[in-house]
Amino acid sequence: MNPRPSPVEAGRSCPDVRREDVWFSSRGQRCAAWLYRRHSETHTAAPCVVLAHGWSGVREQRLDAFAERFAAAGVTALVFDYRYFGASEGEPRQLLDIDSQLDDWDSAVAFVRSRPDIDPSRVALWGTSLSGGLVLTAAARDRRVAAVVSQVPYVDGLTNLPRLGVVGLGRMAVAYLRDRYAQLRHRPPYMFPVVGPPGSFAAMTTPDAEAGYHGMDPPGSTWRNETPGRVALQAALYRPTKTVAKIACPVFFAIADHDVVTFTRSAQKAAAKTPGAEVHVYPGGHFDPYFGELFERVVADETDFLVRHLRPPASR
């Protein structure tokens, strides 16, 4: 894994792309977002892809790089922070709740569909890691979604449990109970680290986890290395692989062949059950698609997929 931009990426710019700060409401709270689109866009309504990050991630952790490329190809991109994270509203901070994040996806999609400069029939979803599973769930329950990109997706929480081992499972159980106790006493959440070195107590302790998260983090990032204990049980029971058969649109799976965070085989099994799946397997681990030459390959393939499936019906 190389956290620095590749020579190709470092030398590339998208001068025709502009970024606008926008926001939308989700359950009465403001979600901060960036809207990327071309300066030279016509007055016709454009296709749009909505992006958000994975476990505890925030929009400045490399999502801007993907969004800029999509917008340069003519696909407007909305990148948002979930409630409780980054620049969005919500207390307590860092509250990772899968149901709340799915609500935020629904609100983000409703927001772009309501805009006069977006074609509501050509809205796609892009997710990575945990959000790679969330977009599968969102598309399974919203048949108007035009296309999905699911990158190194978290598809089956139960398959992740054995990797924790007995000690890890015990630590997670204690974190869950301590946080639930804090909730009952109306105290701040009990937090534990998102990433840590192998053998430590964190949600992710694979050899690439710390370097991956910190490699995505630009100066001044709002990301914080903490997550509430209550999410342990919820994440273990979250299984978007159970609903993929209901998805009615094309789905691009970007799978890393040495993914030891969300597991290569789990993603391949989910893709095999997904109608209209387009499966791409790339060399590397869970965090490699965000960086360097592999980023260039992945973002080019994802851009091609979005352009193909978000073209106006008459031009397909």
Image: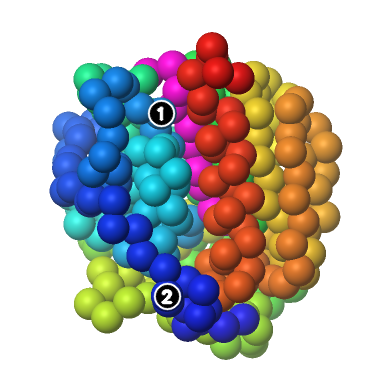
| Residue indicated by mark 1 | 47
Please tell me which residue lies in front, 36 or 153. 36
Q: Image quadrant of residue 10?
A: bottom left
* First of labels 1, 2 by sequence position: 2
Q: Image quadrant of residue 219?
A: bottom left
Give the x, y percent position of residue 280: 75, 50
Residue pictured at 57% horizontal, 83% vertical: 2
Give the x, y percent position of residue 50: 40, 39
Quarter containing the N terminus: bottom right
Give the x, y percent position of residue 230: 45, 55
Please tell me which residue lies in front, 20 or 308. 308
Residue pictured at 16% horizontal, 48% vertical: 21
Tell me the distance, in whole angstroms, between the alpha carbons under discs 1 and 2.
27 Å
Q: Is residue 184 above or below residue 178?
A: above
| Residue indicated by mark 2 | 11
Q: Within 10 Å of the Cα at label 1, are there few (<14), some (14-19), or many (20+) other Cα atoms?
A: many
Q: Quick one: SS at disc 1?
A: strand
